[in-house]
Each structure stands twice: as C-alpha cells, then as structure tokens.
Amino acid sequence: MRIGFVVNDIATEEAGYTTTRLAMSAIKRGHEPWLIGAGDMAFDPDDSVRARARSVSKTSYKSNKTFLEELRGPKGRAERIAVDDLDVLMLRSDPAADQGRRSWAQMAGINFGRAAMRRGVIVVNDPDRLAQAMNKMYFQLFPEEVRPRTLITHDRNEIKEFAKEQGGQIVIKPLQGSGGQGVFLVDADNLGNLNQMIESISRDGYVVAQEYLEAAAEGDMRLFMMNGQPLRYKNKYAAFRRLRSGDDIRSNIHAGGEKAKAVVDDVALHLAEIVRPKLVEDGMFLVGLDIVGSKLMEINVFSPGGLGSARQFEGVNFADAVIEALERKVDYMGFYKRNFNNIDMATL
C-alpha cells in the first residue's frame, strides 16, 4: 500500500508528531509512506496530480527521529510521484498554521485532494467537508446539546452584551485558528480590557464568544474518533487529558499545558455518540474531540495530534489501528472495483 501524507511542510515535522507515528506504523506493516508538503503538489498538463515527495528505503528504524533524519537527508528518497497512483492520500496539513505569510497554502491539500479523489484515490478526511471546516463555524453545525453557548460576531457591543448575559465571564477567541492562539478569558478582573481584547482578535476577522465552563479549570480530554467511533484498540481508548499550567486558561500542550491519563466515561461516550452521525456523513475518518465536562470545546478534523500521548498512558500503539483501518479501506476499494462499476467513495 502506498500512502501519501500531506503536511504543512516536511522541514517542520517532528519525531513526536502523529503523522510521523503513522508513517512509522505504515513502514512496520510493510507499506510505503510518502510525505508531501502543502507547496509540493502540481496539476500537470496531462490532467494528472503529481507531487515532489519524500520517502525512505529501509523497512525498519530504531526511532522516529532516525526515520525523519533519513527522510529529510541525502539518503532519503526524493521523487516526483504520481499522486493518482497512491492507494491513500491522508490530508494532515493544518490551515491555521499557514495563516498570514503562507495563506496560499491553506487550501492546497484540500484542492489537490479533491483532484486525487476524482481519480480514484482514497482521500481522508473528505476534502469537500474539510473545506467547510476551515473555521470554527463548522462546529456550530453539530447538535446544540454538545456545544457551549456561543456567539459569533464582529460587533463589540454584541460581545459585551453576551458577556453580561453570562455573568461577566466568557471566553473569546478568533473564528480561525488553533493551538490556543488568541484565546482570552474575560471575567470581573479584566472586564475593563474587553475592548482591547476584542480589537486584538477582530483585527483578523470574526470573534467567537463562548460561555465559560467551570470544568475547564480541570483541563480537557482529547478523545480520538475513527470512522465515527471512539478509537479503541486492544481494549484501550485513544485518549489523554490536557491540564492547565498555572493561571493559563489554555490546556493545549504547546501552549504550556501538561498531560495526564484520561478516563473515558459514559459522558464522553455519550458525546461521541451524538456527533457520530455527522462525522460519518462528512467523511471524517480521523478526528479529535476536545471534551470539557459534559460539552465539546472543539472538534479537530484537520490534523488531530496526540496519538503518542495516548500511547504513553495506555501502552498501546494506536497508530497501528489507524493504518489497519486504511488497509481495510484499500481492500474494500479493490473489491468494489472488481465487482461494481460505480464506487461511492463515502462508503469506504
């Protein structure tokens, strides 16, 4: 099986990233992974999709670090491959990471993913639905039961009124973005600075104002979903907790948060069941649910990270489960091609 992984930039990938772990699992299972940067794809004059991609030659590596070193080094394989000939193209680039200087790259994976899908390549997550999820408005399409009370606006007076309705305590953040960037907690102590906070966020677009969930003081849980179900492998759930560091309201790991073991209880499983139908309908193969108390704070559909953290606490290599699921998709694709003329990619 030949698997392409679209990332923001091969040069910025790290050994602990989930994409690296997936590529390593693919190698271990006898497959051929190719990493493709968001700026490395091309639509050729012959109507084929190609890419300047990198892979490796060995069938095993001592560590993720040595794998990446060879991949990027002179011993790695650097070729212009036909994306059309891949079995699977996994879109793992995060549009939020390309805001600003590389805004041209935000839609690259989605656009070329669409072209590859039209040529029979299995593309996950579904590029058409990823295009709809380019900002946090996508989250509002899920049942109200799972979401905090939310206002999305560019009007500061509406935000102030919403803050009053919520007792003066809300969270505001940009409509586009990830990783805890531009997230502010508004309470009685800093209500006087609300204008400055809104101005800082609204400079780049709409503002999301949400009710503050008291359970956020205990951090959040990242629960992985695969094919619409909580990712469970060898009787373990792919999940972990992210805890705040000091007074920082953000629990994102690269924003200073700490990791801990998660307990996937009935509340978390109930939330997962509520969002399951839409995730399946939208072709969201691998996503991350960020759970605070009995609510979802976010659904990461672009590049959910943390499979390594889940493995750290559960002792299970969840990346293997993802690659096994992709193997089944390729097998199903082969079956349909042999037996049917029309293939509905959404069923794979």
Image: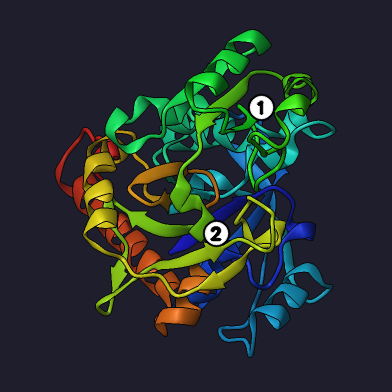
Q: Which mark is residue 45?
A: 1
Placement of 114 over or under 268, stated as above or below: above
Q: Quadrant of residue 238?
A: bottom left
Q: Quadrant of residue 321?
A: bottom left
Label 2 sits on a secondary structure element that is loop
Question: Which residue corresponds to mark 2?
Answer: 305
Q: Residue furthest bottom?
A: 62
Does residue 82 appear in the picture of this structure?
Answer: yes
Left or right: residue 143 compared with residue 172: left
- Given this view, does label 2 or label 1 mark the residue nearer the observer? 2
Q: Quadrant of residue 65?
A: bottom right
**Three-letter amino acid code at the position of disc 1:** Pro
| Colouring convention used in this rendered image of the protein | rainbow
Q: Nearer the viewer, residue 151 or 76?
A: 151
In the picture, the quarter occupied by the N terminus is bottom left
Residue 181 % position (x, y): 71, 42
Left or right: residue 100 compared with residue 133: right
Residue 4 % position (x, y): 55, 55
Q: Nearer the viewer, residue 215 or 36?
A: 215
Does residue 26 appear in the picture of this structure?
Answer: no
**Three-letter amino acid code at the position of disc 2:** Gly
Crowding near the residue tagged with mark 2, few <14, some 14–19, many ≥20 C-alpha atoms within 10 Å = some
Residue 252 % position (x, y): 62, 56
Residue 231 % position (x, y): 32, 63
Left or right: residue 330 compared with residue 8: left
Crowding near the residue tagged with mark 1, few <14, some 14–19, many ≥20 C-alpha atoms within 10 Å = few
The residue shown at (43%, 46%) is: 124
Placement of 266 over or under 294, stated as above or below: below
